[in-house]
Amino acid sequence: MSDKKKVRIAFFDFADCEGCQLQLTYLNLNFLGLLEHCEIVNFREAMSEASDEYDLVFVEGSIMRPHDEERVKKIRSIAKILVAYGACACTGGVNGLRRRFTDDEAKEIVYKDRPWTIEAGWPRPVHEVVKVDYYIHGCPTNNDETVKAVKSILLGKGYTPPDYSVCIECKFKENVCLFEKGQVCMGPVTRAGCGAWCTSSLNTCYGCRGLLSNPAEEGHMEILAKHGYTIDTLKQKFDLYNMCRLEAEKNG
Amino acid sequence: MCSADRINPLSELVAVDPLYSPMEGTILKTKQMTAHEKFFEIRLEGGKELGHLPGQFVIFSLFGIGEAPISVSSSPTKKDKSTFEVVTRKVGVFTAAMHKLEPGDKIGVRGPFGRPFPIDDLKGNDLLFVAGGLGIVPLRSLIQFVMDKRRDFGEVTILLGCREPKDRLFTNEIEEWGRMTDINYACTVDRADPEWKGNVGVITTLIPGVDIDLKRTYAVVVGPPIMYKFVIAELLKKGLSGDQIVISLERRMKCGLGKCGHCQINGKYTCQDGPTFIYSELKTLEEAL
Amino acid sequence: MRYVYLAKSDLDALIQHLKKSHRVIAPVKKENLFILAEVQGAGEIALKYIPTILPPKKYFFPPVEKLGSFKMGDEKMNSVNMETQPTVLFGLHTCDIDGIECLETVFHYHPADPYYKKRRKSLVLIGYECMFPCDEYATCVTMDTHNPKAGYDIMITDAGDKYIIHMNSEIGEKLIGTCLAVSRTGNDADIKFELRRLREEKIKKFKTILDTEYTEIHDLFKQSYKAPAWKDVGKRCVSCGNCTTVCPTCYCFDIQDEVELNMETGERKRIWDSCQLEEFATVAGGENFREERSERQRHRYYRKFCYSIDKYNKFFCTGCGRCTRACVADIKLYETLNQLKKETNNV
């Protein structure tokens, strides 16, 4: 493979914590394996060089401000394949919660009496601004899935994340169901692909990978309500990572 | 030696079973038939005969991409027995990869699978072929079979329907069928283009005009799911019984061996019990149509 | 002799004996539930347990099974290594043994599955008879799987102060035959009588929670295809797939290729799939032949109680209750069946 032309990969981040890029530095041997086929030409977390030709672009973060919009459009125009990488890029992530508030409300909450010096913008997942070819979900992304997705993209067949629930992967691991333990879990309506990462690590599923394409929201609300949660808590559970989508659906 | 090469003393090398292991096929000829459909002529290793009957399908394999079930479009009576033909529509990851293949390229083949058209029942009878869209692809295998054994069958009528004239497959063959005196043939399109001089309308509009001998006619219908209900209703109206209507159904398939469950229609496995069905068999299969 | 005794204090001696030639898998506690896992001694085994999260099928038909390996660009698949370490599955409930019988039926049905056949050969089944119903969700009494009948190599029954061991196959006899821990003081006829008496007592503790008899279930389903119950179940179902993953008789799978990082070699695998998932019956063109949750749930039930009878003359529900326990939406199998019964009575 080494004589073949390597795929030029670039990473760009927008409104996010860069945690998903940081994940990649944990790839270790897998990372070296990928480097057999790829050349990373822009990656702020690990190097500083920049280039302007990209076969495969990973966009991390949500698109907030007008100049972010311009920037991502420019990136799209020079990217052969664009991958939304991480929850902020795929679903708007927790940034989506900003949509609950008007500018004034947000200002009041964040800055109170201090002067508002930073332009806040309106959070959007990448696909609300430019065309996205593939999605790698998660907050943060899961390296096993990232490697799988990159291999699949390199093979030319693209990558479609699973459209079934986290429960499938959780049951494969024979975890005791969190509902069984009286805890609340977004697993049943959340897209799998993480290998039930959190629920296998004594945590609960927050739904960071976004809802399934056809989630049984009502059924799930009913389940959560049965476990004693109020409508407000339920809404917060769903909103945490899905605010942008749920809002878009509400507005038709 | 890397860890993967180390042999676990408690494990056994399991020979790959032919059930799951593809045979090697070589693509001899391809032809882009329409914007989305491509024709392939394929030869198995050593010119081995596929050994299929009309109505059966194969599962193609491209390592790294996966597998996909595809109907065989040529007849086993074809002169050159060392090859078979298929037509695929580019609709998913697999067919997209397959469409990139050109003569000389290789492809894995499993099969043939499934229950063929009931040829013994059809013999000696009049045949009414109704093909909608891609339905002509599996039906062509049977039509060619009948043409090659013309004396074994009675009157033959072919009704073809597709969306637009440019979607028609096997245009040359179809025109030849049209010229033949010993078959009746009609074609219709849902939407005409300026050059189109034929019928316009859905395929059911052709049925009332067909003259059939109810006592000795079998209708063989293949098309998209939406078509069956209407065509079958029209055929029943015409006076055919459920035993005289043969159809072929499409379902998702993975194994081809009646195990993986994807192709189930109620209790039947399409890959083994189908894909061809007699309409009267479907009365208890609510999920069929 | 096919029946022997084992002192309760000698259970570990039996396990140690089995371990000489076999890996021993048994139910062990996991938080408040149970799983089947490898054990080193009797102390780790939870003999009193409700059905494990995953059924024993994971050893017969693993969640991910390699079908073969390949080189990119090749057409023919190469062999793969399959773990075939001689293994004892110890302490299986009779419902799970029935579940294995179901898998047996499917995978041996023509064309028989080569991978299953290979795996099956290395597995020895040692049952542990349930003397009490495990919880309120099991329907084993109606499904007639609460007593040992067939399909096991060895069955262990708690006879109060000791265990009775029944060797039901040549493999079973061979394994116990060399075990010094068992006592061969009884004779088969006496022990059989003792077992019958124990079972007469035991059955008093088992109550059915279904309104339908075993013999009526198939007919009930023949009449229930359009029952309102399916809409109700469909409304509550969230398609998480738990019910099929934990089912001892569900065997649907997907086939996927996985390529190594070198992008030159890879493996073709089959992976458990579920008819409850959105894309299960969707063809490449986009048509989904079981779009509604109600249709998918109905399909699951029919595969257990109707289609399996039509095709294999066997119910594919063992009454283990796993689907009911694992359902996050509280869909209870016995409630559904009781509702169907009520609805057909009203027609």
Image (tube, coloured by chain):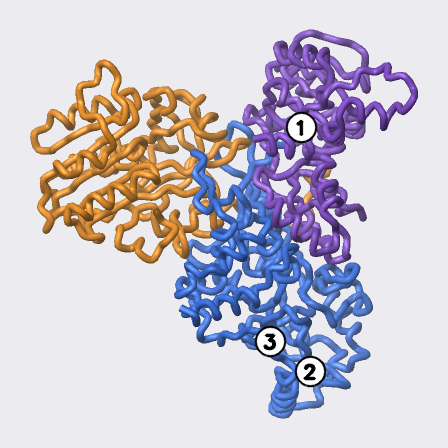
Chain colours: A purple, B orange, C blue
Q: Chain of mark 3?
A: C
* Residue that label 2 marks: C164
Quadrant housing residue B226: top left
Q: Amino acid at mark 3?
A: His
Residue at 35% of width from left, 52% of height from top? B273
Left or right side of A47 for B273: left
Measured as percent of width and height from the top left, residue C63 is found at: 62, 50
- State whether discs 2 and 1 lie on one chain: no
Residues at marks 2 and 1 touching, judged by CB atoms closer than 8 Å: no
Q: Chain of mark 2?
A: C
The circle on residue A90 is: 1
Q: Residue furthest top?
A: A52
Measured as percent of width and height from the top left, residue C317 is found at: 53, 65
| Labels 3 and 2: the sequence-earlier one | 3
Q: Amino acid at mark 1?
A: Cys
Mark 3 crowdedness (10 Å alpha carbons): few <14, some 14-19, many ≥20: many
